[in-house]
Amino acid sequence: MALTNQRWVLNHRPTAAVGPGDLTLQSTEVPDLREGELLVRNIYLSLDPTNRLWMSDREQYLPPVGVGDLMRGGTIGVVEQSRSPRFAPGDLVIPGNSGWQLYTVSHESSTGRVRTTQGVPLSAYLSVLGATGLTAYFGLLDICQPKPGETLVVSAAAGAVGSVVGQIAKIKGARVVGIAGGEAKCRWLVDDLGFDAAIDYKNEDVGEALDRHCPDGIDMNFENVGGPIMDAVFSRLRRNGRMALCGLITGYNSDGPLAGPSDFGRILMQRLTVRGFIVIDYMARAREAMADLGQWVADGKLRWKDHIVDGLENAPAALDRLFTGNHDGKLMVAISDLPSQS
Ligand SMILES: NC(=O)c1ccc[n+]([C@@H]2O[C@H](COP(=O)([O-])OP(=O)(O)OC[C@H]3O[C@@H](n4cnc5c(N)ncnc54)[C@H](OP(=O)(O)O)[C@@H]3O)[C@@H](O)[C@H]2O)c1
C-alpha cells in the first residue's frame, strides 16, 4: 500500500511575519522509487531565519520557493527504502532537496550520510555538527580571522550560530562580547559558555554597553542581526577591523531592502574588511570544519542547545520564535520518531 506524505506548501508570499494561511499542509501519495533513489523518513526539520527569506521573491542566494511548491528546509532522517547500492534501510542521512515534509525521495548523489558519535544526540547533526556549526566556523575563521587578545562582538549571540561563534573565538584566544535578548540568555553566555561579557539589548543601551566593554574599540563583528544593533557595533570597529556579515534577521519579515551600516565611509577611513558569506559555498570544505567541531564537542569545549518543537503541523507557528527570540538554542521540529538505535 502506498505511503502517505505530509508536506507544507507555500500558499502565498507573506508580507510580514508568517501567519495562518501562508502555508498549507497537504497529504500526498509517496511516489515509487526510481533507480538511485531513497525514501527518507524525516526525523528533524531545521527551522532557520532564511526560511522566511525563501518565502519572499526578493533577490537572494537561492531561487525563492514557488507559490504552490513544497516549503524548502533542511532535514535529517532515516532511510526506509533504497534503490541505491550506496544506502541501506536504517542509514541516517541528510536528504537532498528536502523540505517541510514527513518523507523525502532523495537521489543518492545529493544525499549525505550522517556518521553519529555515541553520546551525541541526532539533533546535533542539524545544529552544532551541521550547517549551524559550519556557518559559525567558516564565517569566524575565514573572514574575521581572530587573533589572541583581539575583541569580537557577536549579535544574536545566544542563538544557534552566535553561541558557537563566541565559543570558537574563545578557543582561538579572543575576547568575546555577545549581544542577546534577555537576562537569562546573557547569563548563559557568560556563566556557561565563557564569554567575557554579554549585553542585553532588550534592557540596555547597546552603544553605552559597548563603550564600557570594548573601551579600545572592536576588532571583529560577527553580524547576525542588522539594524541599530549592527550600527552600534559597526561604528566602533577600529582600524583594520573585520565584519563577517552572516545575517540581517531584522529585515527578513518585510520586503524592503536589507539596509547596511549607516556609516559606510568607515570602511574607507578605518580600512575595514566587510564580507558577506553563505555557508553553502563552504560545503566542499565541510570535513575540515567537522574535524575541529567534532573534537571540540568531544573535549567539552563547545556546548550547544537544541530547541525541539514537536510535530510537523507546528512548523509555521514555530518559525516565528526565531524573530521573537522565544527559543533556546537551535530551533527544529521533531517530525517522526528516532530509530531505536539512535
Ligand atoms: N550566511 C549564512 O550562511 C547563514 C547560515 C545560517 C544562519 N545565518 C544567519 O544567522 C543569523 C542567526 O541564525 P540562527 O539560525 O543562528 O538563528 P538564532 O540566532 O538561533 O535565532 C535568531 C535570533 O535572532 C535574534 N533576533 C531576531 N530578531 C531580532 C531583532 N529584531 N533584534 C535583535 N535580535 C533579533 C533573536 O535573538 P535574541 O533572543 O537574543 O533576541 C533570535 O533568537 C540569522 O540572521 C541567519 O539568517 C546565515
Image: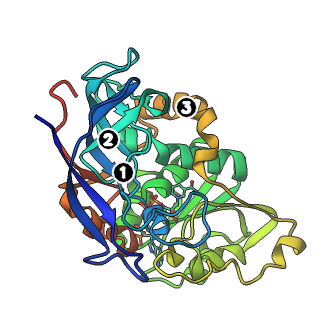
Question: Viewer-nearest of labels 3 and 2?
Answer: 2
Label placed on residue 173? none
Left or right of 138 on screen, residue 17: left
Q: Are the residues flagged by discs 1 and 2 in contact, CB closer than 8 Å?
A: yes
Q: Which three-letter amino acid code belongs to the residue tagged 2?
A: Thr
Q: Quadrant of the N terminus?
A: top left
Q: Are the residues flagged by discs 3 and 1 in contact, CB closer than 8 Å?
A: no
Q: Residue at x 72, y 78 (%)?
A: 235
- For residue 338, what is the image quadrant? top left
SS assignment at label 2: strand
SS assignment at label 1: loop
In depth, the one of 198 and 14 nearer the eye is 14
Specify which label sits upstream in the sequence, 1 or 2: 1
Label placed on residue 292? 3
Q: Quadrant of the C terminus?
A: top left
User: What is the spatial separation of the Cα atoms under label 3 and label 1, in whole angstroms?
Assistant: 29 Å
- Inspect this view and state whether residue 170 appears: no
Q: Is residue 132 above or below residue 229?
A: above
Q: Residue at x 35, y 44 (%)?
A: 75
Residue bearing mark 2: 104
User: What is the spatial separation of the Cα atoms under label 3 and label 2, in whole angstroms?
Assistant: 30 Å
- For disc 1, the neighbor class at 10 Å (few under 14, some 14 to 19, many from 20) is many
